[in-house]
Amino acid sequence: MKSDMTMYLHNAWNDDAAQGEAPWPIDYWLLGSSIMLLILGLIMVGSASVSVAEKQVGDPFYFLWRQLMFTGVGVFTTMAVVRIPLRVWGSLGLVMMIISVGLLLMVFIPGLGRTVNGSARWVSLAGFNMQPSEIVKLFCVLYMAGYLVRHEEAVKQSLGGFIRPLLLLMVLIVLLLLEPDFGSAAVLIVTVVGMLWLGGVPASRFTVLMGLAVALLSALALGSHYRVQRLMTFMNPWDDPFNSGFQLTQALIAFGRGEWFGVGLGASVQKLFYLPEAHTDFLFAVLAEELGLMGVMVVITLFTILVLRALRIGRAAERRDRPFAAFVAYGIGIWIGLQAFINMGVNMGVLPTKGLTLPFMSYGGSSIVVMCIALGLLLRADYETRRDDRPTQRSTYTPW
């Protein structure tokens, strides 16, 4: 089996290289919006982290230098991923899911797992903190895309084909909730449900699945004291503005101070030890204070363009009979759009507080690199779809 797998990957790479003489088509809207988000994220991380970096390590640009390094690694990774045929990713679905389970288990190993603010969401390796949940979301999208292609008829017609991927998903959800990481669990559930719907799950089963997902998320939200407290705080953060409602009230103050055009880049007051996690989860609030409503609208527009282009790539791939490319693009579009919506909603006080980063912008190596890999996959899907106008044969290699 190992030799068959090696030969398959070798042939996939060489087949692609043989067709690589044509000019490389690029979706400039997708690439441009992503680059602008990365650049804007670098600017805001530098601005939002000056005070906390000076206090913690004595270097006001400490987090900016690290974010620049993460972005450089991410850009290099994007360039590498774009060169890998999607067939390679499609053949590694189960391997990626096994790795996902292993990564989520690592956070509970003493000496490897790192706990911050009561949550064990990080793995410490060589002086860097990796957040496995970011990698797991990407791997789950790729696995589901492959599963929907290999078991298309079973997903549409049989209950077993519909339930099997959900059982594996539940393993990941349980591990995420043990950290606890309710936000990533919610994003994963909605992304997979969306992909199943696009994969042709009958309306009756989809309705039942949506009901079960809502019931599960509601039970999880109400089954923990701290989550109930967050929900109560979200309803009226001003009831306890110096304790449970502190983050949200400070974020709302930042939005209020920003008005139309902001107080000016670098002039935020809320980032000066008032707003916790100003350069990570609440970066959007600092942006709103410094750049105002106009800056907020620019960010929302860029994410809208990115998500719409991802869905367009998925639709084009579906029409050209490239189902794996289509589901990858659909899954990434749903994932990025949902996570950006939740982060911005939390910052604006329209959603309960959740520890989710703003894609392409928030500080963090795991998030930046994984988002850049996702961008590379979208560019690759677009390239393969536009490269060959002929309907392609689906891969018959199904090692698992």
Image (spheres, grey):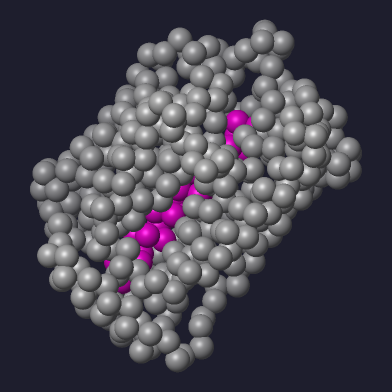
Asked whether 346 or 55 is in front, the reply is 55
In the depicted structure, whether residue 65 falls above or below residue 388: above
At horizontal 51% and vertical 83% (from top left) the residue drawn is: 24
Furthest toward the bottom, the residue is: 21
The answer to whether residue 214 is seen in the rendering is no
In the depicted structure, whether residue 124 falls above or below residue 386: above
Q: State the image coordinates of residue 236 (x, y, percent, origin top left).
A: 63, 14
Q: State the image coordinates of residue 174 (x, y, percent, origin top left).
A: 31, 28
| Most common secondary structure along the magenta stretch | helix
* Span shown in magenta: 322-348
The N terminus: image quadrant: bottom left
The C terminus: image quadrant: bottom left
Q: Is residue 152 inside the magenta stretch?
A: no
Which of the 4 image quarters holds residue 74? bottom right
Asked whether 95 or 249 is in front, the reply is 95
Which of the 4 image quarters holds residue 321? bottom left
Q: State the image coordinates of residue 51 (x, y, percent, origin top left).
A: 81, 33
At horizontal 26% and vertical 34% (from top left) the residue drawn is: 171
Describe residue 47's horizontal placement relative to residue 127 as left or right: right
Q: Is residue 328 inside the magenta stretch?
A: yes
At horizontal 58% and vertical 59% (from top left) the residue drawn is: 73
In the depicted structure, whether residue 7 falls above or below residue 95: below
Q: State the image coordinates of residue 348 (x, y, percent, origin top left).
A: 66, 31
Describe residue 66's horizontal placement relative to residue 172 as left or right: right
In the depicted structure, whether residue 116 falls above or below residue 140: above
Q: How many marks?
A: 0
Describe residue 123's horizontal placement relative to residue 104 as left or right: right
Asked whether 156 or 19 is in front, the reply is 19
Describe residue 163's horizontal placement relative to residue 37 as left or right: left
At horizontal 35% and vertical 69% (from top left) the residue drawn is: 86
The answer to whether residue 19 is seen in the rendering is yes
